[in-house]
Amino acid sequence: MAPVLILVRHAQAIHNLKQGAASDSSIHDPSLSDLGIRQCARLKAHLNTELTAEMVENIGLILVSPMRRTIQTALWSMDWLLQKGVPIQASAGWQENSDHPCDTGSPISALKEEFPQIDYSSLDPVFPEKNSQAADRYRYNRQAILARAQTCLGELYSLEAKAVIVVSHSGFLRQGVTGCWFDNADYRIFDIHKDQPVIHFTLRQWERTKAGGLGLSWTERTELGQGLPEDSSLSMASE
């Protein structure tokens, strides 16, 4: 049986500080802002009280996009799960869409030094590259992002864990995976389904998180792929 999927957007990072304007995409692999750190504390308290004991017991893995803001969100809001022995792994498949500096990760060697708590053994060695031939699956275009999302869901579907947490990004979660909006440090819970005869993975959201688990996220939905360029040379600001 496929695991229950808890999808979390990272807390506010310093490239998100501009209000009423596009994010500052020039900041490379930004860290969390002061507000983002407080949002992690709020998320931690919420998960501790709102997730049932059975759900917590069933969480067998935390997957994290290998970028500072997602790693920090996981470490600061889910440390209590790590203390219970839940493994945390970096996965390039869950990184953000664009190739702007803010959506381009740091070298794996730097991440290992800064965040030694993370298991990098399964991290694609091509990371953080997005534009080379070897990194075709991470290109910023509609076809690549939708295909990457399906690969990510397929990998989760085959896991033995009963529940998995993924810490990722608004753009990839909305445009590639769910069609749902995510506020900073909010989450949604889904069941994964495999459709036949053509293998295609879809998600069915739990009613209780239709506005986000913390009630902070828009309820409107968008079509998967909406707003993504057909050509990766057409770039847009990060979320």
Image (spheres, helix red, strand yellow):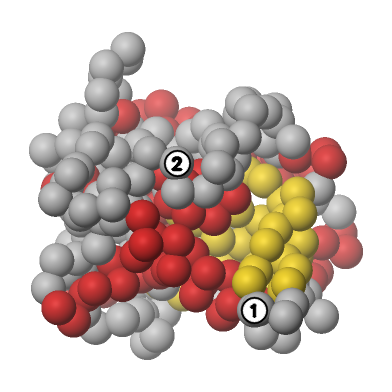
- Residue carrying label 1: 199
61 to 180, vertically: above or below:
below
Is 147 on the left or on the right of 220, as rendered? Answer: left
Determine the image quadrant of residue 238. Answer: top left
Residue at image coords 86%, 59%: 53
Residue at image coords 74%, 77%: 196
Is 51 on the left or on the right of 43, as rendered? Answer: right
Query: Furthest-top residue in view?
Result: 20
Amino acid type at circle 1 is Ile
Q: What element carries label 1?
A: loop
Q: Is residue 113 visible?
A: no
Residue at image coords 55%, 42%: 223
Residue 207 position, x and y percent, is: 84, 41
Q: What element carries label 2?
A: loop
Residue 61 position, x and y percent, is: 61, 73
Quadrant where the N terminus sits is bottom right
Quadrant where the C terminus sits is top left
56 to 151, vertically: above or below:
above
Is 215 on the left or on the right of 17, as rendered? Answer: right
Total numbered labels placed on residues in the image: 2
- Residue carrying label 2: 226
Amino acid type at circle 2 is Gln
Other residues around mark 2 within 10 Å, as few (<14) / some (14–19) / many (≥20)? few
Between 190 and 37, the residue placed more toward the observer is 190
Residue 201 position, x and y percent, is: 65, 69
Other residues around mark 1 within 10 Å, as few (<14) / some (14–19) / many (≥20)? few
Residue at image coords 14%, 66%: 131
Query: Furthest-front residue in view?
Result: 197
Residue 6 position, x and y percent, is: 66, 56
Determine the image quadrant of residue 106. Answer: bottom left
Q: Can residue 70 be seen in this view?
A: yes
